[in-house]
Amino acid sequence: MKKVRSPKALQAEMRRVHSKGKTIGFVPTMGALHPGHISLVEAARQENDIVVASIFVNPTQFGPKEDLKKYPRTLNSDLQMLRQAKTDYVFTPTAEDIYPEGFSTYIEVESPKDQPALSHILCGKYRPGHFRGVATVVTKLFSIVQPDRAYFGAKDYQQAAIIRRLIEDLNLGIDLKVMPTVREADGIAMSSRNRYLNPEERQRALALSRTLFWMRERILKQRGNLAGIRKEGIQRLKPSVDAIDYLEIVDPFNLQSLTRFQPEMVLLTACYVGKTRLIDNVIMRASKKGRG
Ligand code: AMP
């Protein structure tokens, strides 16, 4: 595995890879890797000649009061995990490499007419500027790595939807692969931020996945009553979490809240447990008849 820090050097290396007719699969991460990240590397390994992962804690996607400074950094164990998963290149730029003096171009994913912008709803509402930072860094990473395929987790459902839009709108010609959320045995979604949780908080954090799974069951049974089920979901979350940013039932494509049952829906939540903000979601597909 080759570790590359400089954007220019990696870009040149990727051009050489392409000139040999090889395909490139890319997995962007912020490090503090866990099996969820590695599932993306494994998918990339299966479908491409060359696998590139990046580790970059992107300052522009953190708000002024967010956890940029204390975000977990575990480079040595990250490198070991990536090596084990047979990654070919790991890109580890510094903030100055990505945002040099004078940097002033940002990417903002807005929305078609008459709809709130994808970047400004759900997490975008509670983390102003977050998706602008994500879209900007991902566009930069794409132009450095020039991947054929890029691998993202369904765990960050809204992020994947925004990147899908961005790839299409900017004609990037990258095949976006969104891989299923990897969970711990008890159902909690794996996340780098789970490291912040003390044992008592870790137990309470189970409420997110449990509530989403419970809602999915109820919706599949009732095939309606979304407002009532959402309300009850909030009641179920409340005793365990310290604050609820949102709990929503949305359309999988435009992420708008739904009032009526439809065959494909996504249930999404963001909650604080202690000082840690956690997100989770469940994608549901109901069969035409009976339970999905
Ligand atoms: P992060 O390092 O949190 O920015 O995540 C990097 C990539 O890994 C993103 O595409 C995430 O959606 C994905 N990811 C994070 N957690 C999981 C998980 N539990 N299962 C699958 N993918 C994940």
Image: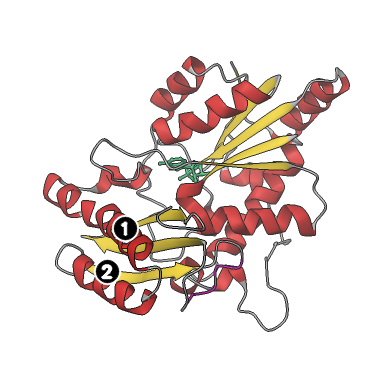
**Which span of residues is magenta-colored?**
254-258
Instruction: Please tell me which residue is depicted at 11% across the width and 50% down the height of the picture.
Output: 200
Q: Residues within 10 Å of mark 1 (few under 14, many from 20)?
A: some
Instruction: Please tell me which residue is depicted at 39% across the width and 51% down the height of the picture.
Output: 69
Q: Is residue 270 left or right of residue 113?
A: left
Q: Is residue 252 left or right of residue 12?
A: left
Asked if residue 258 is positioned above or below residue 282 in the image, the reply reads below
Front of the two marks 2 and 1: 1
Q: Quadrant of residue 207?
A: bottom left
Q: Is residue 164 left or right of residue 130?
A: right
Asked if residue 256 lies in the magenta stretch, the reply is yes
Q: Residues within 10 Å of mark 2 (few under 14, many from 20)?
A: many
CA distance for labels 2 and 1: 12 Å
Say which amino acid is labelled 1: Glu
Q: Residue furthest left?
A: 200
Mark 1 and ligand 1: say if the CB distance to the nearest ligand atom is below 8 Å.
no
Q: Which residue is mark 1?
A: 217
Q: Is residue 281 visible?
A: yes
Q: Are marks 2 and 1 in contact (CB under 8 Å)?
A: no
Say which amino acid is labelled 2: Gly
Q: Residue furthest front?
A: 289
Label ID, residue 233: 2
Q: Position of residue 70 (x, y in %)?
A: 35, 49
Q: Is residue 152 left or right of residue 139?
A: left
Question: Which secondary structure dominates the residues rendered in magenta?
Answer: loop
Q: Position of residue 257 (x, y in %)?
A: 49, 75
Q: Residue furthest bottom?
A: 114
Asked if residue 248 is positioned above or below residue 195 in the image, the reply reads below
